[in-house]
Amino acid sequence: MDEQPPASEASNSDRSTTPSLPATTPLRSPLDAAIEQLLKERPSQNDDTYSSENREQGELLRTLHPFTECDSGDTLIVVNFPKGHASCAWEDWTSMRFIVHSQKLLATGSRVFANLLSPQEQARFFRRMEYTGESFSQRYVIDLTPSAEGDDLAAQLIELSLPLSVRDWWTSNERLGISQYLVSGHDDYCPRHTEMYTDCMKVDNFVKADVTLPGQTEQLPVLDLADIQIPECRAIDDYCPIRHRANIIRLILATQGHDIVLNSAPRVYTLTGIANIFDCTSVVRDSVCTWFIAEPNTAFIDINAEVAFKIAWTLQLANVTRAAFRILVTEKALDTLAVIPPPPGSKLTIFGRPRVDLPDDLQTVVQYAAHKFADRINQTLAQMRSDEFYDLLEIPDYRNLLEVGDLIRNCIAMSQSANQLTLSRCPSRGTILLNELLALHTTLHTKLLEYKNRMISDAMNTPPQVDQERNFDRDRRCYVPRTNWNPTANIYGGFSDAQRLLMPHFWETFSGYPNKITSPCHPTKFLTEDVVRYNSKIEESLMYLRLGNRNDILPGDLYFELYKFRENLAKALDREWIAWTKPDLEAPLVRTNHIVLALNDDEFQYLPLWAGGLDDGTGGVFEAVVPDADMGPIGPGPAYHTGDTVATDASSMSQSARTPSEGSTATLTAGRSLAAVFSHGGPTTTTRDGSSVGGSAVFVTAGSTVASTATLDEDEDFEFDDSDEFSEEAWSQVEEPI
């Protein structure tokens, strides 16, 4: 028999009019809500009997008998259950009738509750209650029983169906050491309650292995996924009507100020979906955020990045959204940069993490950001291999070397002019020494570029060290069973050069060369001989180097000091290593140490405003970037030029593609702003696109997009002609100025 509150003395037929919508109470601020939630979930210091188990049991009884807690108010809530479904308390779920306050429902800001309390909907509910012969004394009645058919049911099935990774997250209690009060909770339909254990059932041939790592206290996952056999009592359905209804009751109780107990991933996922359906996600936001960041449960974000991203997006949890977004974008960028990209819809990432399908709108956000990130990686690799490498790192010793080269050339030109004036057919001793010095300067400059290329090549071809690979493999074993195992070193061996920039050990290896004296890439081993010859010739030619017009250069500044070069290079590469491998993460990501997560504003721009992005809902962020016109268009005709590029005072290795320019490429770090890179080119500098810029130093905006290497809708037959010549047909389309 259904549990009901006391019947009213007055019949529904006594009501002559449908009640009007109640007045709403002022909405609480997010800070007030967060503080209240934390106080509710914090045990009293004077309560020795408080425990997670007591809290869990109390919540179960409250959900089974909500009318014991909600016995006053002006609104009757109706939730009908199908018969014959047992709960964890060994009693069947029965249809519920309990009373709540309408003002508290409206205080959530829910448009759904406002509609359900409207006169039109109330009239429909009254007729239904009269038809069933039920009487009640409350002013309002709301039937929240899920639809049994139609479009509403289909939409709710999509919203509330659990991915397999969510259903099996209970195994993380034993495997990863996560509290059972966070992950081991039973499903609401629990016919085998006495058979439910927190530990995993092992396969028959299971042999426990010694998983302790040498010299470390942290352990590998205690169980390999291949050793776990899912018992029938834990093999829950992806959708369950009892789970659906029970969590509707939990949500309504939460709107009335009652505690929310999140003891399993299925409950978190379902409550989030139901709160979204009823447009009151703020009710569960703080509790779900607490569940996510309760370590070591943060591993859920690493291992189930798509699910975490969807839940956090729905609840507008900015930190969790951005953390999961980092993982998804990097994994997608790795696919884009592969020599042979994986087939569309692949269910595993390149490192073997199982993927879960995202809704189309979220998938679009990830795709755009991943292609932007892939472009940035390709541009970074191109710039590392270019002659601008040391300039972009702002190595003063290299810049000084270029300036000395300009000085030598000027002195040679002046010496040759003097010889012509004296009609001398034989070059002077000064001219000979200066030409010899210029040859040694050219050799040293070439050697520096060879040294840079040697460092890049060696770092690219160096696999992870034993301890690094062990740590990477440890994290990957959290989601890859031994039956599908592929060591990280093997995966890295098949990477393209661009993909290797997304591995943290590349940056660690690359940045360590200037300080590792035993390495063949140490500067002293590679450059000492050429530096000694060059400095000796500088000393020999000093009297012929006319410094009168260069008062800022002293004779001692002409030497190339290798030890200073090494120190400055080491500092610069350390900055790169930190920028790429140690970003300020919004949430602890302890199981994703094997990939680079250094996204910047260029990738984050596709997130909504509440998550620190630029998407205001109009879709403008997904449109093609239009160059800024601050400097005004240059030249006639339909061609658009952005004029001179404006320099900024940000780090030379930072980058952003907010203001693209053709003559620039991406920088080496994952910074967050535009950067100005000082390029020493002497009287005339040749830019990367082949054009010459005369006069003083040229500033190149770092991080601009040269050309997209990956597009969402690629047309292989399209060819872009970037010349400044236009056909007569094109000119005919241009209107004459008025």
Image (cartoon, rainbow, N blue to C red):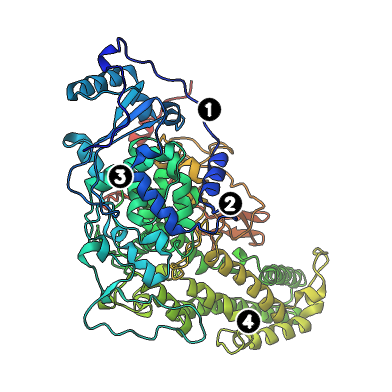
Crowd band around label 4 with a 10 angstrom C-alpha radius: few (<14), some (14–19), many (20+): some
Three-letter residue code for mark 2: Leu
Three-letter residue code for mark 4: Asn
Three-letter residue code for mark 3: Ala
Helix, strand or loop at label 3? It is helix
Three-letter residue code for mark 1: Pro
Q: Circle 3 sits on which residue?
A: 246
Q: Earlier in the sequence, mark 4 or mark 3?
A: 3
Q: Are marks 1 and 2 in contact (CB under 8 Å)?
A: no
Q: Report the quarter where the N terminus lies.
A: top left
Distance, label 2 to label 4, CA atoms, is 30 Å
User: Is residue 682 toward the left or the right of residue 617 in the image?
Assistant: right
Q: Earlier in the sequence, mark 3 or mark 1?
A: 1
Q: Circle 2 sits on which residue?
A: 674
Residue 207 in the image, given as x and y percentages of width and height: 29, 85
Q: Circle 1 sits on which residue?
A: 26
Instruction: Reply above or below: 41 against 353.
Output: above
Of the two numbered discs 2 and 4 in the rendering, the one whose residue sits closer to the viewer: 4
Residue ID at (74%, 78%): 559
Of the two numbered discs 1 and 2 in the rendering, the one whose residue sits closer to the viewer: 1
Helix, strand or loop at label 1? It is loop
Distance, label 4 to label 3, CA atoms, is 61 Å
Instruction: Reply above or below: 71 against 227.
Output: above
Distance, label 3 to label 1, CA atoms, is 28 Å
Of the two numbered discs 3 and 1 in the rendering, the one whose residue sits closer to the viewer: 3
